[in-house]
Amino acid sequence: LLHYSKPLTVECAVRLYPNQLQVGEMADGELFDCCVHLLDIFQETEGVDMLLKCMEENRVTRAAVCGTPVTKKWDNTEKERPKGAFQDTGRVYFFTATDEMIADELQEYEDQTAIESKIVPMACGFNPTDNFASKHLKRVLSKFPGFWGGVGELYMRYSEISMLTNEEVTRCNHPAMRDIYKLCSEKEIPVVVHSNASSESAKPYAVGYEYTHEFASVLEEHRNLKMLLNGCGMFERGKFQPPYEDELMHNLVKYPNLFLGVTSWTIEGCQNAMSNETLVTVVDLNPTRFVLSTDCPGNLLSTEYNRRVSILRDFVRKLKPETQELVMCKNAEELYRGRVFGK
């Protein structure tokens, strides 16, 4: 859509340019996973061996690997430890040690050739509402020079996570993040964020996308920054009116430094936001701007990773052949070009 204007909806494009649902060979080829949480919300993991094994089994040649920026509290009122973030009302809090734990896991692994060729380490262990955040990040970058390939995944507007976090609500355009974005722009490394497009309200008057301006203002101010919006701003509850595909198209046209991450849970659970058929059309219309993420937590690698990759590949098969190769690997290589080949 070279002359896209907002009144031209993706619904029209679906009718005018129906996607060919052919099974492309590229969908079974090499895949770049743009977000894996080697440490889960309890800062636990099945280990680097398991991650590399899962990658090998699923022809995932590279992965951007991070910890989790928050950790779950085991409340004194609970007799048994929580098994998930939302199992009880125990709060979560920012966990700065996650970066050092990731560095230890990766740097102490015996096969450093595998790490350097397959893993892009990501730093996320700081409080995005703290004006000292950039100072903490610089300290981590200096302690492990040449190691980090990006910043993220940072939790901004994130449903229950936001509600459970013992802090002010994080947002992409928080003043504390300004120096983070400047630093990433200077070092030419991307920032990966999860930020919902709007609140999860079913109230009749709650229409529109009150949070998209938060990441849009960042992209406007920091034109050299590459931002990956993991999950595309979609979530499984709430109303997406007017059509969210038009909101996405508007921002993709306006901000060439915006990338969008299609995750397995985007495909499985966000039909209220956008049908998979429409999402396929949006990706085909913007073939250089989308990447894939399993978003798999480190304690579920052996049970979840294969399934999540399979969901992503099934989605890719619905794309045009010329789009498939870009979405599977090439876009991610451009996004993480500073560390793609262990540089």
Image (cartoon, helix red, strand yellow):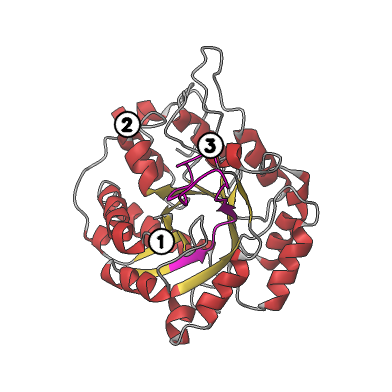
Query: x%, y% of residue 70?
Result: 59, 53
Nearer the observer, 313 or 255: 313
Disc assigned to residue 299: 1
Q: Residue at x 19, y 48 (%)?
A: 22
> SS of the residue at dot 2?
helix
Queried whether the magenta region covers residue 71, the answer comes back as yes
Please indicate whether residue 274 sits to the left or right of residue 210 in the image. left
Q: Position of residue 261 (x, y in %)?
A: 46, 50
Residue labelled with disc 3: 159
Residue 97 falls in image quadrant: bottom right
Left or right of 264? Residue 110 is right
Sequence-first disc among 1 and 3: 3
Is residue 53 visible in this depiction of the protein? yes
Q: How many marks?
A: 3
The stretch of residues the image draws in magenta is 63-89
Q: What residue do we see at 51% from left, 76% from top?
A: 105
Dot 1 surroundings within 10 Å: few (below 14), some, or many (20 or more)?
Answer: many
Q: Amino acid at mark 1?
A: Asn
| Badge 2 density bin: few <14, some 14–19, many ≥20, Cα 10 Å | some
Residue of label 2 = 14
Q: Find the distance from the CA under tag 1 to the CA under tag 2.
A: 39 Å
Q: Amino acid at mark 2?
A: Val
Of the numbered discs 3 and 2, the one sitting upstream in the chain is 2
Is there any visible trace of residue 3 in the rendered image?
no
Residue 288: where, in percent of width, then height? 45, 53
- Please report contact status of discs 1 and 2: CB closer than 8 Å, yes or no: no
**Label 3, label 2: how many angstroms apart (C-alpha)?**
30 Å
Q: Which label sits in the foreground, 1 or 2?
A: 1
The one of 135 and 315 positioned closer to us in this rendering = 135
Q: Secondary structure at mark 3?
A: helix
Identify the amino acid type marked 3.
Ser
Main secondary structure found in the magenta portion: loop
